[in-house]
């Protein structure tokens, strides 16, 4: 248990009591620096205070107290390393039952940690507000700005739901006023991605409306939705990839795939447009987005898996390549079904069929540690790599298992849940086995002595959220505190390795730890939000009954609850 001193200090500020850490996990001597896990006199330290005791446990825990029992910071953060928690590798492990007092202590510690995550959000937001207010992105090393989304305040809008959930209401309402007074989509320059604009900006506006009820967000979302609709004006109904938002703007495919649409993009629009249709009364939003998905699903595949590119310029869509990787298309098959109150069974069937195809054909086991991973398929050949992006699947499989029409105890649900847990452990190892505590963009599985290596062409860390997302969902559903521990390790690495004077920076290489002058909007929208909600249960989001997250971590009520 990462019983770190900063969290203990937060607990003390709240007047809460921290009991012995062995209530959390047994100190069994594994990797102990002090073998028996008992209290010990501490050797001399460079401090003016009299030190009373120290405990070092199997997970690198250090607790130090002075003679008054107050915690003292005597060490800097060091990644704890991989190869820990091996019992979770196979997805079968059941944690011990916690007594009420133990569970209360776990929750108190997590609450203290959430305060520290909130401070990270406050730091990043204040840097954006100071240097790049209303711009798309802050560059956190130079404190300059960019408008990668044509100048629509992408970071501001993408952060709205995070501000609300973190209780940063003053900042939220200041951002609302910017949306009301300064946001003009007709001024956005050049073409923008239909997918990215939908999930970040449209999704951000919709979630802000869902959470706050402020009508300005609905009006802005409706304006944006009408401008995005021109992307669906294709012969095949499969939308274009880019659109110009000004009144006379055109829509077209992105240059690098000018004759086709990207599966993960065309299949990751429906949750947002269906919600927009519900609150605006414009049924065409839902109709157009669902027609595109339904047209694609008419193309039968024997395993439920679809290639990454789809021809969309002819009358009927067709496959444009022979490459399969796992992205948001499969995520939304499940979420559309949940959003619609589990009534549209064809989407659930398509999801279950795809999950079976993934588990039968793309799931592999590494050597020597027997880690479960999801490979890719290119021209009929397996490519043994897994992207950080793919790590969303661990949580998605768990959510699918807990909502399975045949019940969580059915064989299919149990297989999905087991695989989801296995993937969560592997994705955690992608962080834990790195010397920096951060994961590269992808890893190659080579069945060598280390199971995997960082991707040669992508050693960078972009502050991505997918692993934190999976940790949140699995904790939300299972209440196993190990996911909080893993998420806390990830947060500590982010805090230690990526923080700048104004915000947080991407990393060019997770070994050299050279910072890159970029911070995408999803860091505040997703990564910090998931890490906060993972540690803080004081919210009303219920993934089993009332909410779905869009793929940018914007919570939306299911349609039957939207008024």
Image (cartoon, grey):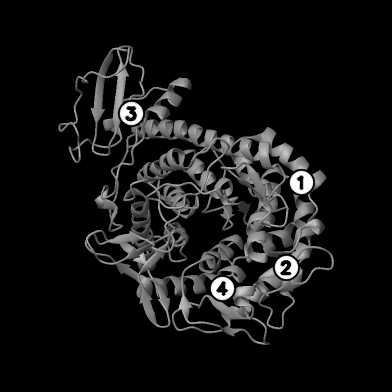
Residue 157 showing in the rendered view: yes
Q: CA distance from mark 4 to mark 1?
A: 31 Å
| 2 and 1 marks in contact (CB < 8 Å) | no
Helix or strand or loop: what does disc 3 sit on? loop
Q: Which mark is residue 243?
A: 2
Q: Nearer the viewer, mark 3 or mark 1?
A: 3
- Identify which residue is drawn at 57% across, 45% down: 524
Is residue 456 found left or right of 30 in the rendered image? right
Q: Which quadrant is home to the N terminus?
A: top left
Q: Which mark is residue 91?
A: none
| 4 and 2 marks in contact (CB < 8 Å) | no
Helix or strand or loop: what does disc 2 sit on? strand
Q: Position of residue 84 (x, y in %)?
A: 26, 47
- Identify which residue is drawn at 52% across, 38% down: 500
Badge 3 is on which residue?
75
Find residue 448 and report its image quarter.
bottom left
Q: Position of residue 246 (x, y in %)?
A: 81, 63
Find residue 482 and report its image quarter.
top left
Badge 4 is on which residue?
263
Helix or strand or loop: what does disc 1 sit on? helix
Q: Residues within 10 Å of mark 4 (few under 14, many from 20)?
A: many
First in sequence, mark 3 or 4: give its number.
Answer: 3
Q: Nearer the viewer, mark 2 or mark 1?
A: 2
Q: CA distance from mark 2 to mark 1?
A: 21 Å
Q: Nearer the viewer, mark 4 or mark 2?
A: 2
Is residue 539 found left or right of 490 in the rendered image? right
Q: Which mark is residue 179?
A: 1
Residue 342 showing in the rendered view: no
Q: As rendered, which of 322 and 170 lies closer to the eye?
A: 322
Q: Nearer the viewer, mark 3 or mark 4?
A: 3
First in sequence, mark 4 or 1: give its number.
Answer: 1
| 2 and 3 marks in contact (CB < 8 Å) | no
């Amino acid at each position: 248990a990462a019983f770190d001193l900063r969290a203990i200090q937060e607990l003390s500020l709240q007047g809460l009591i921290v009991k012995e850490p062995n209530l959390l996990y047994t100190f069994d001597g594994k990797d102990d620096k002090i073998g028996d896990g008992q209290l010990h006199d501490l050797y001399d330290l460079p401090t003016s205070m009299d030190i009373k005791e120290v405990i070092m446990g199997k997970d690198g825990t250090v607790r130090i107290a002075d003679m008054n029992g107050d915690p003292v910071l005597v060490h800097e953060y060091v990644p704890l390393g991989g190869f820990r928690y091996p019992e979770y590798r196979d997805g079968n492990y059941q944690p011990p039952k916690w007594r009420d007092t133990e569970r209360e202590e776990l929750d108190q510690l997590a609450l203290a940690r959430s305060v520290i995550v909130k401070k990270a959000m406050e730091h990043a937001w204040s840097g954006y507000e100071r240097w790049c207010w209303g711009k798309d992105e802050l560059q956190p090393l130079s404190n300059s700005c960019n408008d990668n989304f044509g100048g629509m305040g992408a970071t501001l809008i993408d952060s709205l739901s995070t501000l609300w959930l973190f209780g940063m209401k003053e900042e939220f309402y200041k951002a609302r006023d910017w949306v009301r007074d300064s946001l003009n989509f007709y001024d956005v320059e050049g073409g923008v991605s239909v997918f990215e604009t939908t999930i970040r900006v449209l999704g951000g506006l919709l979630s802000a409306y869902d959470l706050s009820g402020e009508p300005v967000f609905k009006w802005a979302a409706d304006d944006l939705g009408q401008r995005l609709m021109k992307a669906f004006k294709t012969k095949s109904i499969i939308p274009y990839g880019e659109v110009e938002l000004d009144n006379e703007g055109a829509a077209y495919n992105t240059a690098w795939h000018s004759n086709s649409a990207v599966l993960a993009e065309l299949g990751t629009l429906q949750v947002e447009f269906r919600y927009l249709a519900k609150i605006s009364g414009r049924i065409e939003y839902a109709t157009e987005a669902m027609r595109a998905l339904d047209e694609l699903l008419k193309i039968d595949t024997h395993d439920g898996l679809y290639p990454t590119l789809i021809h969309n310029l002819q009358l009927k869509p067709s496959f444009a390549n022979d490459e399969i990787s796992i992205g948001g298309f499969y995520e939304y098959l499940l979420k559309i079904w949940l959003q619609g109150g589990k009534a549209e069974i064809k989407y659930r069937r398509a999801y279950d069929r795809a999950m079976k195809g993934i588990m039968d054909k793309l799931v592999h086991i590494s050597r020597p540690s027997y880690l479960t991973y999801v490979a890719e398929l290119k021209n009929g050949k397996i490519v043994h790599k897994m992207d950080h992006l793919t790590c969303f699947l661990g949580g998605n499989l768990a959510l699918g298992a807990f909502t399975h029409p045949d019940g969580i105890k059915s064989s299919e649900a149990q297989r999905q849940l087991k695989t989801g847990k296995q993937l969560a452990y592997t994705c955690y190892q992608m962080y834990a086995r790195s010397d920096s505590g951060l994961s590269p963009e992808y890893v190659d599985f080579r069945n060598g002595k280390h199971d995997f290596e960082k991707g040669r062409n992508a050693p960078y860390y972009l502050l991505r959220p997918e692993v934190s997302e999976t940790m949140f969902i699995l904790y939300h559903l299972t209440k196993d505190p190990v996911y909080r521990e893993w998420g806390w390790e990830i947060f500590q690495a982010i805090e230690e390795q990526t923080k700048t004077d104004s915000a947080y920076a991407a990393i060019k290489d997770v070994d050299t730890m050279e910072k890159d002058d970029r911070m995408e909007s999803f860091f505040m929208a997703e990564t910090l939000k998931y890490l906060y909600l993972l540690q803080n249960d004081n919210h009303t989001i219920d993934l089993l009954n009332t909410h779905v997250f869009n793929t940018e971590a914007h919570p939306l009520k299911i349609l039957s609850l939207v008024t």
